[in-house]
Amino acid sequence: MKKIEVNKNNLFCMGYSLFLIGQILGHTFINILPLFRYFLIAIGIVLVLLKIAVFDHITFNKSSLIKVTFLMVYLTVSLISTKTSGSIIPIVAFILIIGAYDVDFDSIVKIFIYTATLLLIITFAFYSLGLISESTALRNGIVRHSFGYRHPTDLTAMFSYILMGDMYLCIKYKRIIYPRIILYLFLGFFSLVICNARLGSITIFMLIPVLLFLYQKNSLGAKAPLFIIKNNFNIGLLLSIIITQLFATHATNFLVHLNQLISYRLTYQVMAVKLFGYSLWGQKIYQTYFQMFDNGSWFFIDSSYYVFLIQYGIVLLALWCTFFYLCQKRQINRGNYIIPVFFLIICIDSLIEQHLYSPEYNVFLLSLLANLKFNPSLIRLKY
């Protein structure tokens, strides 16, 4: 029995690691043939599918049939969204989330940290040796260094998710925290001063009080925070829609200054709504935009919520909201509030950041069905 568990974990983690390599390299200036990257991603996904086929079995009862029916609908919608949006993320995210079922989540986090950190080191080394360039992004006359990554925001987002993964293991196994706090401070100031990535820097700084709190506390007593933690994605979605609609129709001075502070992300979201509208099944917004305006103009949607609403489709969004809420509720009921707190941070960032549904960044997506192996006697949740 032990051998089966090891093989299952290794098979999934090998597939996930290959996927990470293929996807993360695409966010750098390392000159790798796209076909080679796609090959790595494809082999990784095949290994995950093999894990599902060999190790995941269906027990035929009423409860399991309801779950399987929901997942089949989720799969179908993900396939449709992938086709209509022109992005592989919807189907890949689905496969990895389902493939992580009953896999040791600690092993997943470790393989994410090892793979992503190694690629960071390689990218920095290539840049230092002059083998690759960096982006030449400017903000207020200040060069935003990316050290071989295509965008400074992608680099700092990778910092944030690697640190959150390490922080999860640190809290769970009660590892030494003070060297980590020093590292967080260094990377926070590094990303702020050198990369000029404000959101990433704030997120890294935010991890310090969260680490201190979760490391010492073994319960959450207030019902209001629990409600927010369970509904963090839905609340973030509602806030994102309200703020964007207010900016489109009643742009107060506060919203205008907020838009300037977040590098005109609200402007781009309003543009996307006016140009493309909300989509039920997804649409190819970037291909369409650059065909319409072939003048090299910059356009992006940097809110995870609006990526769903406009690019991936409202149907997929509704299924994801349902699935995510049920998984969050189950984890909290089992006494695991560490990962839901991380998701709260991610959902706050997702108001102006697009990596929530990207498995090459957000490793915690794979925690929803993975084996967390928490000891309820050590981690308790009070209602």
Image (spheres, helix red, strand yellow):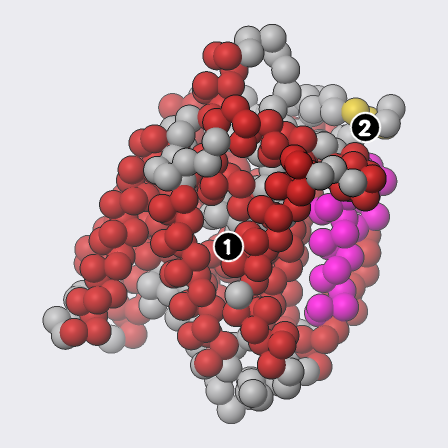
Q: Over which residues does the magenta segment extend? A: 188-211
Q: State the residue position of label 2.
A: 139
Left or right: 313 in relation to 265: left
Does 206 appear in magenta? yes
Q: Residue furthest front?
A: 250
Query: Which label's residue is closer to the chain start, 1 or 2?
Result: 2
| Number of other residues with Cα within 10 Å of mark 2, as a class: few under 14, some 14 to 19, many 20 or more | few
For the point 60% across and 8% down, which residue is it? Answer: 295
Q: Nearer the viewer, residue 91 or 167?
A: 91
Q: State the residue position of label 1.
A: 363
Q: Indicate the quadrant containing the N terminus: top left, top right, bottom left or bottom right.
A: bottom left
Q: Nearer the viewer, mark 1 or mark 2?
A: 2
Residues under numbered marks 1 and 2 in contact, where contact means CB atoms less than 8 Å apart: no
Q: Quick one: SS at disc 2? A: strand
Q: Quick one: SS at disc 1? A: helix
Left or right: 195 in relation to 276: right
For the point 43% across and 57% down, which residue is it? Answer: 321
Left or right: 18 in relation to 136: left
